[in-house]
Image (cartoon, rainbow, N blue to C red):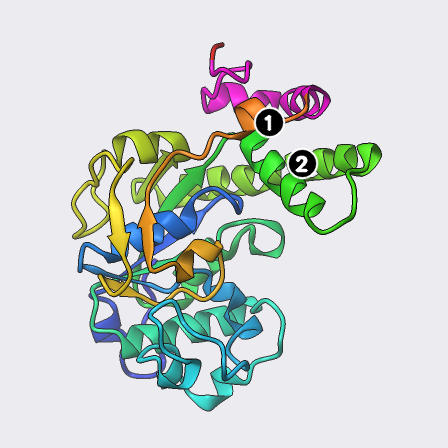
Amino acid sequence: MTPESADGNGEEAAKKTLVYVAGYGRSGSTLLGRLIARTGHALDVGEVAMAPLFLYRSRIRCACGSKMAACPIWGALPKALRDLPRRPANPQDHAALLRAILDVSTQPTIVDSSKTASSLAFRPYFLSKSLPVRLRLVHLVRDPRAVVWSVVRDRRTKRDRPSFWRDVLITAKTSFVWQVANAAAELQALWFSPDVIRLRYDHLVQFGTQDSLQDIPPLGALEGVTHDSGIGDYHSLGGNAMRNEKRVVVKLDDAWRAQMPRHLLSLATVLSFPFIIRYRFGLRSDGAT
C-alpha cells in the first residue's frame, strides 16, 4: 500500500503516515483532528478534498490564523494546486494536494478528514495506491439520529419556518447517505486491516481513544478539556466552524435526544436500524436498547 513516489521524494514520504478519517460528516472529525494536532506529533489539514473550494480565496484565513498566502502549509503549495477548479478535488487532485503537503510538512503524521460520503466513498483506497505513505483508517461514526437532527436544524435556520415534508425528506436522504458513507468505510476497513480504528463520537468525547494512532498515544477522556488556538500544527480549511474558534471546551453534543421531533426520530431510527444495532447506539433516544 505504499507505492514509490514519482517525484523523487518517495523515500522521505514513506516514513510518514496518513491518518484518513472515514465515515459521514457532522460526526466530530473537526474536533478529532484538532485534538490530535495538539499532541505535537501530527499535522491536521481538515477536509483536503474540499480545499479547492477555499484555496482561491486569498482573504480567507486558515485555522492557524494566517491568511491563505501566508499559511506555512497552504501558502507553500504550488500555484497550480492553489488554482484547481472550484469544486471538491477529484482523486488525482486530492492525491496531488496530499503529496505536496507531505513534502512541505515536517510532521510524521498527516490527518485528512475528507471522509467517505458520496464521491469520496472509496477515496482512501485510491490514495493508498497513489501515495508513498502508510495509510491508517479511522472510522469515526456518530449516531445517525444526531447527524440527521444536525442537518435538519441547520436547514431550518436557512428558511423562514419549518416544513413538515421537507424535514421528512431531509431525514430520509440523510439517513440513506449516512449509511452509504459508513458502509464504504466498513468495506475499506477490510482492505486496510489491521491499520483501522473505529471510534464512536460519544465514546471519543467521554472516554477518548483506546488505540494508538501511529506515534500518537491514546487520548484520554476529552469532555471538559479546553483547547486554545495556537497549540498544535492545525491548518484545517473545511469542516465545522469550530476550526476557527480561539478556545474550544469539549462537550458531548446530544441535544438531539431532547429536541428532535418524534416523527423524525422514529423515521431515522427505522431507516438506519441495521447500523444502529451494529454500532450499539440503542434504539431509544435515551440510549437504552
Would you say residue 136 is visible in this rendering? no
Q: Earlier in the sequence, mark 1 or mark 2?
A: 2
Q: Position of residue 235 (x, y in %)?
A: 35, 67
Quarter assignment of residue 61: bottom left
Which numbered dot is residue 259?
Answer: 1
Which amino acid lies under the numbered mark 2 shown in the image of this protein?
A: Phe
Please say if 204 is above or below 112: above
Q: How many marks?
A: 2
Q: Is residue 286 on the magenta stretch?
A: yes
Q: Are marks 1 and 2 in contact (CB under 8 Å)?
A: no
Q: Which range is magenta?
A: 262-287
Q: Position of residue 71 (x, y in %)?
A: 35, 80
Q: Residue at x 36, y 80 (%)?
A: 6
Which amino acid lies under the numbered mark 1 shown in the image of this protein?
A: Gln
Q: Position of residue 127 (x, y in %)?
A: 43, 62
Secondary structure of the magenta portion, mostly?
helix
Give the CA separation, mark 1 to mark 2: 21 Å
Q: Is residue 216 on the magenta stretch?
A: no
Q: Residue at x 54, y 42 (%)?
A: 184
Q: Secondary structure at mark 2?
A: helix
Q: Residue at x 33, y 70 (%)?
A: 64
Quarter assignment of residue 210: top left
Of 229 and 42, the residue lying toward us: 229
Left or right of 13 in this view: 185: right
Q: Position of residue 37 (x, y in %)?
A: 26, 57
Please say if 289 is above or below 115: above
Left or right of 269 in this view: 23: left
Q: Secondary structure at mark 1?
A: helix
Of 249 and 25, the residue lying toward us: 249
**Foreground disc of the pair 1, 2:** 1
- Residue placed under numbered mark 2 in the picture: 176
